[in-house]
Amino acid sequence: MDSETLNEQWARICAQVKSYQDIDPSQVSAFFSRLVPQAMSDSFLMLTADNDFIKTWVEQHYTEVIVRALRDLTGVVFAVAIAVDPTQEQRKIAAAGQPSPAAPLSAPAQPMPTPTPAQPAASTIESLPSQPIAAAAPPSPAYGAPLSQATPFEPSGMVAHSLAEDVVVDHYAPPAPAPLSQEPVAERASNPSSSLTFENFVIGESNRMAYSMAVEVAESPGRLPLNPLFIYGKSGLGKTHLMRAIQNYIEETRPSMRTVYVDAQDFVSKYSEAGAIKDQEKVSFRNFRAYYEQADILLLDDVQHLQGKKESMNMLFQLFNTLTSQGKQVVLSADRAPKNIQFDERLKSRFYSGGTIDIQPPEVETKLGIVKSFTDEFSRSEGLGNFTLSDDIQMYIAENSGSNIRELKGAVNTVIYRMIYCDRSDISIDEVRELLANHFTGGMSRSLTVEDIQREVENFFKVSHSDMVGPKRSQSIVRPRQIAIYLCRQLLDLPYGDIGKKFNRDHSTAIHSATSIEERLKTDRDTQEEIEVLQKIICELD
Ligand SMILES: Nc1ncnc2c1ncn2[C@@H]1O[C@H](COP(=O)(O)OP(=O)(O)OP(=O)(O)O)[C@@H](O)[C@H]1O
């Protein structure tokens, strides 16, 4: 969810809370004005408070009513987490001193607070150094500002779709310059056991929510509602990075806690090595079981590999119950949502009992942030001083790499290698193009663009380009627009935020458009045929 939508949703939640009879609106105004929404998904809301006092007060007096408001607005029971960001008060004061205090949505970018392992705090993220942030974090909410009646409540694209099937969710968002801020990577205070940390994780719209949840778990392991935490998304989007970051953070802030990280494939092979299937009384089996049962935090990566492994799944089920019943934290990851993994129902329902969050493909801004972060890290580790890649090379790599960050990292390494070890520090953008000519795998097409798809859909449905990307919401324009958005997602593998921008729409409208076409495709013959023909036409362009 982008910052603007997040602020709109938060304003609606505030208004809903104030509408309850047993609530004193002036007290709500006083306390809620000290909260800033950081992230929101289908069933999770993360807020930051100015200080510990506000956090504790709101937790004790208002969490329930916020959950009630969310349930009344969405029909979903949300988990609400509150962390502390002591710098937000200063930013609000600075913003208030600016000429346009009436426009909080355009307030300066606010970095997400970053935990540092030197902090012993249990559930706050105070006094934290800045860290690389690819996209602007949400500014202060427009609390108390009049709500736009035109915009339906929309916790996320997916939920809005299921709640309001018949409502046209189509938020026209005139183009704005993309935010781009990149701070130097913070040095770690001590040696981490893996180099994957919160500090070198670049945050953008696509992963902010997963990042927030991971931070919350690292700060307060075992605490409901984020136990278990289930992170899913396609390969190379940073799931393992976040799991290792949680592990590193806990190892450094709470050395007495035992963290166990294991990939599901390893888990399966260690389980069968332990001879567990044949003889559960064997010492090897008891050791295997004890190893995991003694964990305070169990991180199990790529759980889709447990599919079809009945005994291993059963083992995990038992371990899961043992650990969570003792308040131990479980974190899981997979390449798809739990509902799409063939798990037994008992396991599935347990996986859904905590926080579930996906990581989307990164936007260009996030990829650019990652290019800079990798380059900085390389330069620091090699003692290269101010070594950097030129802006056009960075942008070329960010724009041409696919969603898998490994591909992007490989491209950066290839260019750096050529510059440093082949003594070509003056490498030009044309040489980089040639060097990386066969590097990028891309989605279905490398040369196809959003504009190509828009043009073909416009021709097909006889819609003008200005209507395609404009504010009109008549059915004869909305449907072609939704089809064009769906096709962009299918054929270009771009993040919804990037697609939305090309249609002057926000991230959640792009999701809603694509999912409503997906729904129609299940039953509507006309839509099936139109999409089939359009796909053929578009693929011939390539
Ligand atoms: N937001 C990010 N900031 C910095 N580095 C990132 C980010 N996302 C991914 N990476 C890097 O990209 C590489 C791949 O990430 P990771 O291994 O976490 O992906 P994954 O989602 O677990 O993939 P898989 O499902 O294939 O295991 C790692 O080097 C990781 O550090």
Image (tube, grey):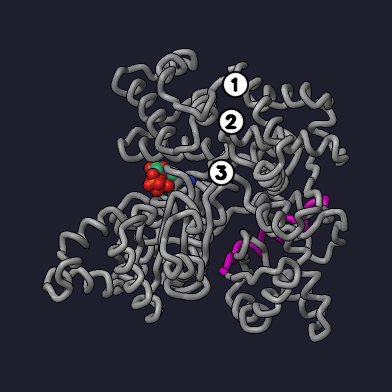
Q: Could you tell me if the residues under marks 1 and 2 are in contact, i.e. CB atoms within 8 Å?
A: yes
Query: Quick check: is the Cβ at mark 3 less than 8 Å away from ligand 1?
Result: yes
Q: Earlier in the sequence, mark 1 or mark 3?
A: 3
**Label 1: element kind:** helix
- Residue under label 1, please give it: 539
Q: Is residue 188 visible to us here? A: no
- Residue extending furthest toward the left: 283
- Residue under label 2, please give it: 491
Q: Which residues are magenta?
A: 82-100
Q: Residues within 10 Å of mark 3 (few under 14, many from 20)?
A: many
Q: Earlier in the sequence, mark 3 or mark 2?
A: 3
The image shows residue 380, relative to residue 530, as above or below, that is below
Q: Would you identify the image quadrant in which residue 285 lies?
A: bottom left
Q: Nearer the viewer, residue 135 or 308?
A: 308
Residue at 62%, 22% in the rendered image: 536
Residue at 44%, 52% in the rendered image: 199
> Residue 134 location, x and y as percent?
56, 43
Alpha-carbon span between mark 1 and mark 3: 32 Å
Q: Quadrant of ligand 1?
A: top left
Q: Would you identify the image quadrant in which residue 427 lies?
A: top left
Q: Nearer the viewer, residue 234 or 121?
A: 234
Q: Earlier in the sequence, mark 1 or mark 2?
A: 2
Alpha-carbon span between mark 1 and mark 2: 9 Å
